Amino acid sequence: MKNAPDLSAQIAKSIRDAIVSGDLPVDERLPSEAELSEQFDVSRSTVREALKRLAAQSLIRTQRGATGGAFVNRLTFKDAYGQQITTSALLLSMNAVDFDTACEARFALERACGPLSATRRTADHLATMRAEITRQAQPGLSDESFCASDVAFHRALVDGAGNPVLSYQLAGAVEAIEPLMNMITFTARSRTHIVGLHTAIADALEAQNAGEVDALLADLAAYTVQLGRSVADAKKTTT
Amino acid sequence: MKNAPDLSAQIAKSIRDAIVSGDLPVDERLPSEAELSEQFDVSRSTVREALKRLAAQSLIRTQRGATGGAFVNRLTFKDAYGQQITTSALLLSMNAVDFDTACEARFALERACGPLSATRRTADHLATMRAEITRQAQPGLSDESFCASDVAFHRALVDGAGNPVLSYQLAGAVEAIEPLMNMITFTARSRTHIVGLHTAIADALEAQNAGEVDALLADLAAYTVQLGRSVADAKKTTT
DNA sequence: AGACATTTAAATGTCTGACAAATGAAAAAT
DNA sequence: ATTTTTCATTTGTCAGACATTTAAATGTCT
């Protein structure tokens, strides 16, 4: 049972450990590829493959030219969002996570933000939510656009908590579920119901009524699960 | 202002899109490196760098030999945990997220799991929590070990919710904060207090008393924030 | 025919050497 | 002093070679 990972994987791990441990601080320049290939006693191609692995994780950035090279990259929340969303979406699709489970996770996490958002949401957050509600009420809106607007509404709610760590953690849950939501056909009646709940949520947030926000989110969660169930049932009867 | 990403990055994106869209299903074999280099009209090295990028994201795995090649990898929750934890830890350390913010996020998310865990926790989860509580009460335990046990306790609580998506989302929040917690010196008195709360939480979970679990988690959150504050204050006076 | 050993083909892993392109700094020209 | 040119450094890309691994195909013996 040999477990000998590729040289490029070993080298990537070595450098990654140095970054994670703080040994290589942000914006520090790594040795050039030629120097690294000497240090690790491998060819330049192998070093390059290792560096590409790190670049794929946004751990380094590279720049050409005389003063160029590979630099330790400051991982931004924006970068992390992107990876988080891709990973979550793949997890859900590849592991056949059912709608109920994904929905439960999403609303559980979102309800964690509700009380904080009721306290700290700014006028800007409220404005975004009202704007999305207006869009959602427009007739002739495609299901995809309705879903996208739904995501934007909930992101504003989460961002209202004013905690970037929470926003980051939730980005995956809220956005990754969009493909699953897209399988739902939103009838005019269900849209009206959802818009009503959204409006009530925005009102409660504006009134800083945390308890009301929580109760409304619970209602929305239950209604969404119910919608998902009806779609699953419809599919089952036709199949 | 030219924005021309590397060829290897373009090719990686092309293949990644095919995977995310489901065009390339799990366990599908990609064309060999030679074939890919023909298809994309680049050298084999460039293709290899693209493949290493995808491998770094656990999107593909490679195998040598006659029937080998690159295969679309099923992204497991375990793989995703690892990436999530690394990313979260780096986000916190590189962006100087303060203890209060990280702590708030962590407990907000954890409280989202509390009610679910009260309903669904198994005997196994309870046993794990009791075992960790016992460890935490041992005198002479290092602060690092106490922290590690604390993380294990909370993971069991979260896993008790029986929702893998929730467990995945929270892994980052709970584990990434460990380095920050490690800066705290746990006095005998504070350990006693925490062990007491943990015991009460385990009792409430066993009794399936969701409200009690939530209240206790709120207490624990407040106490932890207070501990962090005292450390920050101590540092401020000495500096 | 079946079991075992050998060969072979295909694929990734690694190395070498070369050239292209970008880029900032030093040198030269104005 | 300013602008232009040159130049050295570094990453990006390519081509070709060889090493290593692996399973299937082939051969050999019982």
Image (spheres, coloured by chain):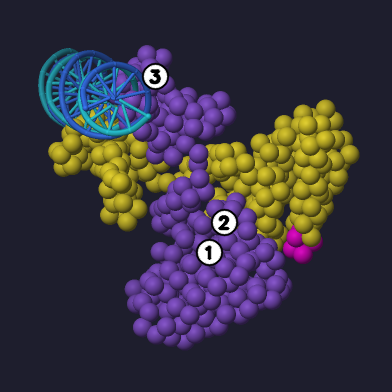
Chain colours: A purple, B yellow, C blue, D cyan
**In the rendered image, which quarter is residue B5 located in?**
top left
Task: Name the residue: 45% across, 27% down.
Answer: A29
In 3D space, how far apart are the residues under numbered discs 3 and 1 (Cα atoms)? 43 Å
Considering the numbered disc 1 on the image, is that residue within a helix, a strand or a loop? helix
What stretch of residues is rendered in magenta? Answer: B209-214
Identify which residue, B235 or B17, lies in the foreground. Answer: B235
Q: Which mark is residue A155?
A: 1
Please name the amino acid that badge 3 sits on.
Answer: Leu
User: Which residue was labeled with disc 2?
Assistant: A167
Among the two numbered marks 3 and 1 on one chain, the one whose residue lies closer to the N terminus: 3
Please name the amino acid that badge 2 sits on.
Answer: Ser
State left or right for residue A178 relative to residue D8.
right
Could you say where residue A210 lies in the image, as x and y percent from the top left?
70, 70
User: Which residue was labeled with disc 3?
Assistant: A36
Among the two numbered marks 1 and 2 on one chain, the one whose residue lies closer to the N terminus: 1
Task: Name the residue: 44% across, 40% down.
Answer: A58
Could you say where residue A174 lies in the image, as x and y percent from the top left?
51, 62
